[in-house]
Amino acid sequence: EIAALAASCFARQVLAGLRVLITAGPTQESIDPVRYISNHSSGKMGFALASAAAEAGAQVTLIAGPVHLPTPARVKRVDVKSAREMLKACEAAMPCDVLIAAAAVADYHPQTAAKQKLKKNPQNPNGLRLQLVCNPDILATLAQRKDRPFCVGFAAETEHLLEHATSKLRDKNLDLIVANDVKRSDIGFNSDDNAVTLIDRQGQQTRLDKARKSEIARQLMGLIASHLPSPINGSF
Amino acid sequence: EIAALAASCFARQVLAGLRVLITAGPTQESIDPVRYISNHSSGKMGFALASAAAEAGAQVTLIAGPVHLPTPARVKRVDVKSAREMLKACEAAMPCDVLIAAAAVADYHPQTAAKQKLKKNPQNPNGLRLQLVCNPDILATLAQRKDRPFCVGFAAETEHLLEHATSKLRDKNLDLIVANDVKRSDIGFNSDDNAVTLIDRQGQQTRLDKARKSEIARQLMGLIASHLPSPINGSF
């Protein structure tokens, strides 16, 4: 049924003319010129979403953290490293109609990024204490704007998946959230497959069974299109 | 002159029959199932060295951190993530005749790797203190063994390059060290080119001008072969 909806959406170019902003990949937070903190996001899901959105007729801007992936056809790509750079690039790409925040943005960055490579501390050869401070919350920041787009978030969790995702939807004032169990090794980070649950503001859940990320992305585009409010979604 | 030496070494299969162990790439040190600390090493220099050593007739074992590179021909590759895994893999590959430690091994790992994805701390929404503890020093550990191989280290530095490299050669009891200025953006991390200075125990320096990493690797094999003690280097 969802696959049929998706197929019909593409046939009808359901996102035609809409400006869709997608974030993808991890961010890298510098400790010094050599070392950084990052995460296992491969960017594959976000790139698949960009590809599917372009196929559905959208004008797609893809803000990508450091990944090893080719740019999808008919997609404008902007490469960034840190969460703060990603926020700036997103703000520069506003306004847009739909925001899909698939990037795994680091929650923290080191308080100080050293200008030179840190040497082991001779005062304390056994350890180092790294003070981390919060990054800006990109999705919450954009969802608070006056020209707020339709906001789709991702929750990558290793436990209490649906509870965490539902809290995130509410706390960040999102329209939809995609819950992604990254504990399973057969899906999620760096896998070519995924299985997700989409949750809307009314708490309605739609499960997308395990499939190629490209297929999951197409199904998500159909579901996102069907949730768009009528002033945006003129063709429905 | 060095290029000529290198060419002559390959013609004579100067490392024929020698067991050469090479480490390459960064290591990844887990903070939790999603986040980690790593560094900008691409593994390209280490993989080029493995390829050049195999070309020169050596039996090559390549212990690789997480990189996006194909395995060179006639090279046995072992993939690892953390520094502690890399040390174990190196110890399992001993004894060997020559060790070339080109990996950018993390000096520290988080004291505790959380089993579940860390949530932002509600007690302190603005920050997080990460306690790091020292990793084992792979090169120094192997250089202290009774069956110690001929040890070649790398020093990737952003300042005081030759001083730091010389200290490392002495402190870790190495035979040769390759000093690599990673501050220059045209060489070093993730570049296809490099320019290095080789330093021996007598303090003699040999500069290899900027060239493709494959070419630098060939020149280094020639220089390493010419420094091997006669019981190993039977053919000289």
Image (tube, coloured by chain):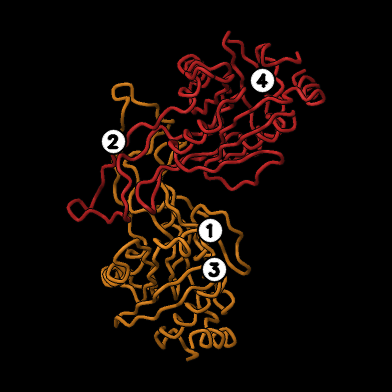
Chain colours: A orange, B red
Q: Which residue is mark 4?
A: B224
| Location of residue A171 in the rendering, given as x and y in whole percent from the top left corner | 26, 68
Q: Which residue is mark 3?
A: A48
Q: Which residue is mark 2?
A: A129
Query: In the displayed structure, would residue A184 be above or below residue A36?
Result: below
Q: Nearer the viewer, mark 4 or mark 3?
A: 4
Q: Chain of mark 1?
A: A
Sequence-first tag of 2 and 1: 1
Q: Along the line of sight, which residue is nearer the eye, B112 or B120?
A: B112
Q: Chain of mark 3?
A: A
Task: Identify the residue at horizontal 46%, vertical 22% (top origin).
Answer: B140
Q: Chain of mark 4?
A: B
Query: In the displayed structure, would residue A229 be above or below residue B112?
Result: below
Q: Which residue is mark 1?
A: A78
Q: Nearer the viewer, mark 3 or mark 1?
A: 3
Question: CA–CA distance between discs 2 and 4?
Answer: 39 Å
Question: CA–CA distance between discs 4 and 3?
Answer: 47 Å
Q: Is residue A144 visible?
A: no
Question: CA–CA distance between discs 4 and 1?
Answer: 43 Å
Task: Tell me the kind of residue under disc 4.
Answer: Ile
| Location of residue A150 in the rendering, given as x and y in whole percent from the top left corner | 39, 76
Q: Is residue B31 visible?
A: yes
In contact (CB < 8 Å): disc 3 and disc 2: no
Say if labels 2 and 1 share a chain.
yes
The kind of secondary structure element at disc 2 is strand
In contact (CB < 8 Å): disc 4 and disc 3: no
